[in-house]
Image: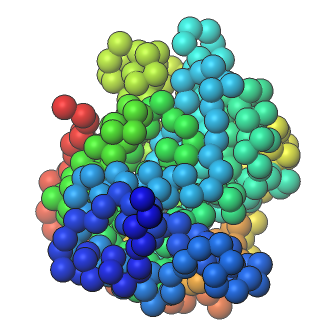
Amino acid sequence: MRDVVIHPIDVLLKKRDGEELSTAEIEFVVGAVVRGNAREDSGETAGAVGETISDAQIGAFLMAVFERGLSLRELGDLTRAMRFSGETFDASVLETFTLDKHSTGGVGDKSSLLIAPVWAAAGMDGGSSVSVPMISGRSLGHTGGTLDKLETIPGFDSQLSLARMGEVLRECHAALVGQTPRLVPADRILYGMRDHTGTVESPFLICASIMSKKLAEDLRGLVLDVKVGSGAFMPTLERSKFLAELMVSTGESAGTKTVALLTAMDEPLGRFSGNWVEVWECVDIMQGRRHSMSADLIELSNALSGWGLFLAGRAESPEDGTALADEILRSGAAYAAWLRIVAAQGGDTSVFEDPAAFHKPKAMRVLRASRDGFLAGMDCKEIGWAVQRLGAGRARPGDPVSAHAGIESHAKIGDRVEAGQALFTLFSEDEALLEEPYRMLGGTVRIADHRPERQSLLREVVKAG
């Protein structure tokens, strides 16, 4: 029996017209995407390995998915094809419960830097063992990137091979690394195309992108932090919940225990937003110094950690897990785990002896309250863009980022403020970059006569069943 020949144009027309694609058709598209990119890199001509797909056809496929969506079966097929489009991590040799966390992105969102050491510490204290193969990304748009924060630590190597990542996991129970070129290459290609085709916000494409990378880590448990609010990619609760449900369903179908927490992103999380300053804030917390502006960060990190400890069987309930996470933070065990992880990845841990002294911006400016009242709100996405334009983020992939650019928040929504009181301190390594972010912050902050109703940090939990 002859194999059925699949042509790109037939697949595109089928999805454009709202029909459901077969597993073979989805696997063909993903395979053709990867083959085409491999040929470009090697200089091969078409026809050497198998049919490829043009950039125009990739764009058309993405737009068809954006407009028509995917069934859960199609989404599972797309995620699976992307997951196995390159090399994957084999966690079976670790003989542990592999666990990871992912955030859909926010401003000042540094919880991974606390969660990974907490879980690693839990994985080393006896009982059911836990390992955290945390593959993270760089800044995207108005949101910060975990890798950019980690790479402000002198000597820290985030670009580990999967083999070296396995060695660090055996030694430290956590590794904080970036995506390798051969890990889920289909996502790397499609991710870049989405940015140029106006399809970034598709919940189906977001789900396949996130879950293909996370499942390639061979996870047994995954905790998702899905942001809601003005600083989120999905600003409404309805859209965020739909994305969370897609990801939980996809993870569970792949055999990974998955839970999603819908959390607020209407203001920067914690005290600092930037790169080194966010590392500094987390080190302070792990060393037992709890600034009042970090209370929301600690609450969120403990909640996410608690769910992970529950999934891993280290706690009888998420609430017990939250209490255990806070205990691990307060005891110093998380900080000890952090030092082991950073040292294993080549980082200079001496900078943590005085993290404030390592912060050396060349220019600073303070935004002050224009009048008495209550801090009533802000456009958190605008805050994120201000941080980016201070030098902490990227206008284009590959742009360098500043280690010391960022902001310090001095008040939270609902706080009473007085005229002249500091609201934000801006940091930059170039004084010329201060003016525009200063105007952006001043234009988005709202001060009112009456205290606004405080919103819960944790909005909802989405889980299987």
> Along the line of sight, which residue is nearer the eye, 172 or 243?
243
Q: Quadrant of the N terminus?
A: bottom left
Looking at the rendered structure, the number of numbered marks drawn on it comes to 0
Q: Quadrant of the C terminus?
A: top left
- x%, y% of residue 454? 20, 51
- x%, y% of residue 239? 20, 62
Residue at 77% over, 78% down: 42
Q: Residue furthest top?
A: 127
> Along the line of sight, which residue is nearer the eye, 157 or 449?
157
- x%, y% of residue 440? 42, 84
- x%, y% of residue 417? 32, 62
- Does the rendering let one see residue 64? yes
Residue at 73% over, 45% down: 162
Residue 341 appears in which quarter of the rendering?
A: top right
Which colour scheme appears in the figure? rainbow
Vertical side of 415 occupied by 420: above or below: below
Q: Residue furthest front?
A: 1
- Does the rendering let one see residue 290? no
Vertical side of 417 occupied by 370: above or below: below
Residue at 73% over, 35% down: 166
Q: Is 411 displayed left or right of 378 in the figure? A: right
Residue at 28% over, 65% down: 21
